[in-house]
Amino acid sequence: MKKILFTAAALMFAFFTSAQQNKMKIDFAYAFGEPHRLTVALPNSSHKAIFDASKEQFQMAWTDHDCTDNPIGAYIEHPLTWRIIFTAKADTTQLKGVHWHRIADWIPAFCYEWEGNDVVVKVHAVATEKGDVLMFDAVNNGKTARKVRIDARVRNNNLNMKWVDFKYKYSIVTPIFEENGDRMIILDPEPTDVVPDGREHLNAEFSLAAGAKSSRIFVCPNKAYLDDLQRVVTTDWKAEAQKGLQVWKDLLAKAPQLIIPDQKIVNAAKASLADLFVMREKQADGMMAGLCGTDLYRATNSIEPNLQGYVLSLMGYFKEGRENIEFTSRFQEADGNWNDFRQWDRFMWGASGFKSYYTKEYYLLSRDTSFLKEQFSRMLASSRWSQKQREITKKDNNSNSPEWGLMPRGMGDGGLKNGTDLLGVFYPHNFFHCMGLEANAWAAKELGRKDVYDELYADYKDLYDCLHKSLKTGAIREADGTVWIPGTPNKTSGSRWGVADAVYPAKILAANDPLAVGTMKNLQSNLSEGGLPLNLGWMDGGLWMAISLDAMAYVNILQGNADQSAAYLYAAINHGTPFYTWCEERKPEPGATTITGDRQHAWTPICVTQFTRNSLVMEDEEAGCLWLTRAVPRQWYEIGNKIGIKDAPTEFGKISYTVERTKTNRLSFTLTLKDYDRSHPLKLQLRLPDKIKGRISTSAVKGAKVTVEKDCLTINPKSNEITGEIRL
C-alpha cells in the first residue's frame, strides 16, 4: 500500500480539492477484514450477544458472566462460553452472505442476508427482555422449487434433545459441559419433525415452490431450563422482538434530532450513540458504568467511560452521563491519589485529569451544582496529592531536566513508549493531568471556595509552567526548523497518542503556537491511502481511527483547517464496518486482517457521536459563544440542502436551528433558543462548497442583530425566535 506524504498546507488543499471533485461518501471502502462484529443487546443490559458476520456464515456468541463478577474497576476478560455457527443451503449449494447491517441501519439489532440458487434468506436478530430472537425469512425468486436448510451448530460439546429421540416434539440444544444439562441454549419454539444434522445442531427446513416464501424463528432464552419449556414455547417472540426494537426507538427519540443531508452520517451517529448504551452495565456494587468494549474490553476504566459520560450528556442523557462519571470518581486513595491505584488505569496520571475535566464539562451542560459539590472534595485532595508527587520530581532531577516538576514515572498505554519501556515520563498523561488541575481550580472558583482557590490555581500553574519549560528542551527539532511534541521528552520512540491534547482540550498551547503547528504537521505528515494518520497507537504502521476524531479534529478546527476534520469524519466511518462498528487498531489497507484490541471498541463511536454533534453546534467557552456548522463537510451546503439540529443541549441552554441553501445565491436560517442565555452570541460558519464572488450579506432578519465578517455570521439574539436570509 502506498503511503502519501503531505505538508500541512498540501494536506488541507488535497482533501478540500478531493472533496469538491469527488464528494465524500460512506461506502466502507476501507472496512477491515471479516468477521465484522455487532453486539446485540438492550440498553444498559448485562446480557450481550456478539454477532460476527462473514461471507460464509455468522456466529452468535455470549457469556453468562458479566461485570458484576469483576472486582470494581478491574480489567477482566470473560471468555465467550456459548458459540453458535449459522449457515444456509439451497438444495446442496452453500449460500453466501452478501449483506449485513443493523435494523433500521442504527439499532443494535443484527441483519444478515444469504443468497444463492435464486434463493434469498434474511436473518433479523433482536435482543428482548426474555431472550435473543432470530427470525429467518426465505424466498425463492427462481422458477424451480428449492429446498432451503438453515443450520445452527452449537460449539463446545452439546446435545439436541431431538437427536436423542427423533420423535421429541421440539428441537432444543442443551449443554453437556459448562452448565446443567437441562439448560436450553437455543431452540425452535414451534413443534418440528426436522431431524437435526447432528447432536450439536438445530435446523430449520423450507420446501419452497417457485416464488414462494416462508419463515421460522429460533430463540436463545435468557437462562431457561427444560422446566420452563411451556413458558418459552408459548411466548409470542415476534411481539417480544418488536418490543425490543421499540425500546431503542423510544430511547434515541430523546436525543437531539440531527438535520444532515447525508443519511448515512445520521445513521452512523445514531448507531454510535446507541452503542454507548450497549457499552454500559451494572457493576459489582450495583452502580451503572460505562465500558471500554463489548468483549475483550468489557470492563470499566476512567478514560472511555468518562468520555462516554460527557458525550451522553451532550446528547441530553444527563442521568446516564452522571452515572458514568460518578462511578469512576470513587477510585481514590486516602492520600488523595485519584489515578486508579487499584484499578485498570494504575499509574496512568491522566486518569484524574479525565475525572476532573469531565466533571467540569458535565456541570457546564447540566448545571448540577450538587454533583460538583460532591466531586470537589475529591478534586481538592487530588490536586494536593499531585503537588507532592511533583515536588519529588523536582528534588530528584536537575532543574534543567525536561522531567523536572512533571508527574513521576508512570504507565503510558496507547502505544506510548520510553524507548522500549512501557513506563516513563509521558507528555500526554501530563497534559491530561494538568487539564484536571485547571478544572479543580475552576471548580473552586465556581463554588465560591476562596479559601482554596489560590492554592489550587497555584498547583495548576506550577505544572503548566513546568510543562512549558520541559517542552523547550524535550520537544523534537527537525532540520527544517519544525518542532513537535513526542510521547516522551527527547525520544521519538512509540506513538504520539495524546500530544495534540496539549492544544485541545488541555489548553496548554495556543493553536497558533509554533510547537502546536509543528506537532500537527508531524502527526499528519503520513496519511494512509484512506486518509487517516498512521502510527497513533500500539501498532506500527497502523491506524487508531478514534484519535483522528478526538483532539486532532478539534485542533485542526482551531488552526483553520476544518476541511481536514470533516474529511476525518468520513474516513473514520469508512474504516469501520457496515454495522458502524470499529476495532481498536488495525492495519490501513482495505480488508486488513491484522487488528488489535476489541473488535467493537468504545472510543470511536464516542468520537463519531461527539464530532457529528460538534460539527453542528460547538461551545467556545473562552469566547463565550456558540458555533453553528463550524466543521460540517462543505458538500452539506450544496443547493437544496438543509443543515441543523433540534433540541440540542448546550452550555448556554437548549437550541434548535436550520440553515437551508435555497438557491445558488440564497440561504435562509431559523433559530429557536428556548432557555438559551441570549447574552452568548452565536457564530454561523458558512461552509460553502463553491467560491463566492463579492460579499455575503443578510436581509429580513428578525429577532437578532447580525454582523458578517467574511463567511461567518455573528448573531446577537434579541428574542428566542430568529429568522433571516443570507445573500451571496
Image: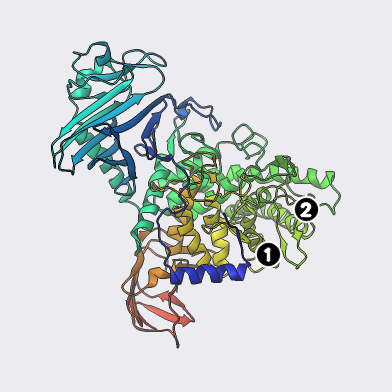
Q: Amino acid at mark 1?
A: Gly
Quadrant of the rendered image containing residue 137: top left
Q: Is residue 443 above or below residue 143?
A: below
Work out which quarter of the rendered image holds the N terminus and state it. Answer: bottom right
Question: How dense is the environment of label 1, judged by Cα within 10 Å: few (below 14), some, or many (20 and up)?
Answer: many
The figure's colour scheme reads rainbow
640 on left or right of 36 = left
Which residue is pictured at 46% across the width and 60% down the height? 614
146, 444: nearer the viewer: 146
Q: Helix, strand, or loop for circle 1?
A: helix
Q: Where does the image place residue 501, in percent across and percent down from the top left?
A: 61, 56
Which residue is pictured at 48% across the width and 69% down the height? 18
Q: Where does the image place residue 6, in percent across and percent down from the top left?
A: 62, 65
Look at the numbered discs 1 and 2 and tell me whether their residues touch, using CB distance below 8 Å: no
Q: Which mark is residue 518?
A: 1
Q: Which mark is residue 398?
A: none
Q: Which residue is mark 2?
A: 490
Q: Where does the image place residue 123, in percent across and percent down from the top left?
A: 27, 38
Q: Is residue 648 above or below residue 83?
A: below
Q: Where does the image place residue 459, in percent across and percent down from the top left?
A: 70, 52
**Along the polypeptide, which appears first: circle 1 or circle 2?**
2
54, 307: nearer the viewer: 54
Q: Is residue 255 visible?
A: yes
Q: CA–CA distance between discs 1 and 2?
A: 15 Å
- Disc tally is 2
Q: Amino acid at mark 2?
A: Asn
Q: Is residue 672 visible?
A: no
584 on left or right of 155 = right
475, 178: nearer the viewer: 178
Which residue appears farthest toward the right when viewing the image? 398
Work out which quarter of the rendered image holds the C terminus and state it. Answer: bottom left
